[in-house]
Amino acid sequence: MTDLNITHPAGPRCIALVGPQGGGKTSLLESILHITGATSRKGSIKDGTTLGDSSEESKAKLMSTELAVAQTEFLGEPWIFLDCPGSVELWQDTEGALMVADAAVVVCEPDLERAIALMPLLRFLDDRKIPHMIFVNKLDTARVHMRDVIALFQECSSRPLLLRQVPIRDEHDQVQGYVDLVSERAYQYEGAKASSLIQIPETVMEREQEARQELLEHLADFDDTLLEQLLEDVQPGREEVYSQITKDLADDLIVPVLIGAAEADSGMRRLLKALRHEVPGVEHTVERLGLDGDDATGLVFRTLHASHTGKLSYTRVLRGRLSEGQTVEGEKFSGLFRVQGMAPTKVVGADTGEVVALGRMDTVATGDLIQGANRSRFAGWPQPPSPLFAVAVHAENRNDEVKLTAAVQKLLDEDASLAFGHDPDRGGLVLEGQGEVHVGLAIERLRRRYNVAVATRPVSVPYKETIRKGTHQHARFKRQTGGHGQFGDVHVDIAPQDRGTGFEFKSAIVGGAIPKQYIPGVEAGVRDYMDRGPLGFPVVDVAVTLTDGQFHTVDSSDMAFRTAARMAMQEGMPKCEPVLLEPIMEVTVQVPSDYTARAQRLLSGRRAQILGFDARPGWAGWDEVKAHMPQSEMQDLIIELRSLTLGVGSFLASFSHLQELTGREADKVVEQRQAALAAAQ
């Protein structure tokens, strides 16, 4: 293979390493860095010595918990690799990396049972027209056939998968090398050394010819000349095939599939050469993002608050040069840093294609576009997903409450898929995220980075209460003191209203039984009580009518009538058959069709009313199950749903209505509420 098809981009090319958790992305990066000479030895995930997993959280969990930037050179050309977390809960970092990358390598295991985990990722890549390859890792320990792997993976991709290599197996069915389907050359793996050229074994010749023909037929779908050659039984030249692959990859028409084993360094050089020959440069990314103009341009794809450098805004330079001291809307770059793993090195500038961290740009956020001296929100930046898991939080040390809020705000700067706020209905301060791992990482970062220990508890469910029947109630508040006394006398009718109507107060006073200036006090007293009814919860869907009363010209006051009204409610409401109302959510669960029945059983086991299911629009092989579900059953729904669906199931939820809760469930809720109120006194 010659260099005729190698593009010469304006600057470094940027590759996002993505894929399901456990696929081996970090190991692949370690192999690449070692082979290209960027590191003297390969790091180990187990030992916590990898460049990609160098944070304390990653070391503790033995998994990638944030994006890592790595820079190297291969055959004299600069490359930037963005090692992305594999957990679906940490998608925000992956999304940012993909927005600025020139291409993605989807790293995955040849695990047929977990193939469906690729679909959400491949869907995003297809929708955004991001060029991508698949690297099937860990093939040295697999006992599956690539044709079966490709067939299952193809169900997850709307683009044709283009198998580039056929594995060569020994008598023990272990992979020893591969046949390149374009060059029709066979190679034997040699560990960290370059693979050696060998004769194509007779045992794979038939499979090689079959797979090569499939490759050519896929390419012919996008090239009439190649199609004519195949129809005339003419074999195209190698350079012609390489050129077509390069063009189709840049146009996101195909998905090349390569194989190897990162831990053993097998297939790494072939992958690097494929990237070098076929991946488009930053100019193509600028075109894909629809960026016009000639000004120096950078897109911020990550924010990090580092203890030693302050706020860092990770930026891909898409055009021109960003320089130390440059001003953007009145704010100067306080240092530019080239990043390798977690280690920043100060530089004076960054040119087209490079990734650089901008120092202490307080007003710059992830998703911002810097063009010359201007900053704007990039219109195509993805919206953060809605939270799926929440906990109520408070600082273990009460003196840290203010510190907690400031520290969480920094985490929100870094990760828009987190949410934080004060919600009295749910227990005070609430921290929300994409799952238990995601929220747990945020709490761990608060402790490690900002020395704020946080206690958590399940969020409260915003129960309400109402009444089933009405009553008439009279109450008098009379108090005699040394001077003016207190006097207020009210008669009220308490009546239930239709569900969802809310609270209503009316005055039916005629003839001046109570002067007009005291009626607002009566309403205030009624509303005071509505915050906590007989069962201990806010009261809804009740109408209260002031029908009569008495006043004293000297002793009556607004406060006296407010107190009398509250007394009337306290005495009358228990007579109205109070009943507990629980919030019901409208839930849409999204799962692969093979898991629909399991999802329905999961929902039914949580007191949900199944409304039906249908095909998920635009997602072949997926369903949406709609249900009405008590909010109290949703605290850990995402945990169990992902457990059932290999991590890919998700849901959307919104408030639907309030519904009566009776029996033992209601008794339990009321008992817990009364105990909590008593303990708080």
Image (cartoon, helix red, strand yellow):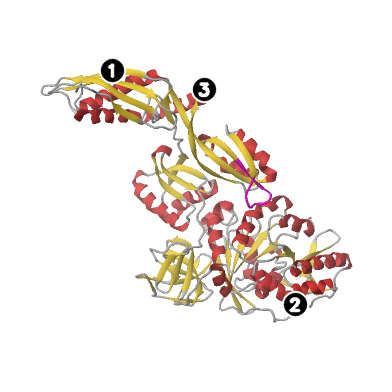
Query: Is residue 558 visible in this depiction of the protein?
Result: no
Instruction: Kindly identify the residue that appears in the image at 23 percent across and 20 percent down.
Output: 549
For the residues labelled 3 and 2, the Cα–Cα distance comes to 75 Å
The magenta-colored residue range is 615-625
Mark 2 secondary-structure assignment: helix
User: Which badge, 3 or 2, comes first in the chain's sequence?
Assistant: 2
Q: Check contact, mark 3 vs mark 2: CB within 8 A.
A: no
Q: Quadrant of the N terminus?
A: bottom right
Location of residue 556 in the rendering, given as x and y in whole percent from the top left corner: 17, 24
Q: Farthest right residue?
A: 202
| Residue wearing tag 3 | 663
Amino acid type, residue under disc 3 in the picture: Gly
Instruction: Kindly identify the residue that appears in the image at 78 percent across and 74 percent down.
Output: 183
Q: Farthest front residue?
A: 511
For the residues labelled 3 and 1, the Cα–Cα distance comes to 32 Å
Amino acid type, residue under disc 1 in the picture: His
Label 3: few (<14), some (14–19) or many (≥20) C-alpha neighbours in 10 Å: few
| Residue wearing tag 2 | 240
Mark 1 secondary-structure assignment: strand
| Residue wearing tag 1 | 474
Question: Looking at the image, is 399 positioned above or below residue 535?
Answer: below
Q: Check contact, mark 3 vs mark 1: CB within 8 A.
A: no
In-front residue for pair 588/485: 588
Indicate left or right for 125 with 323 as reference. right
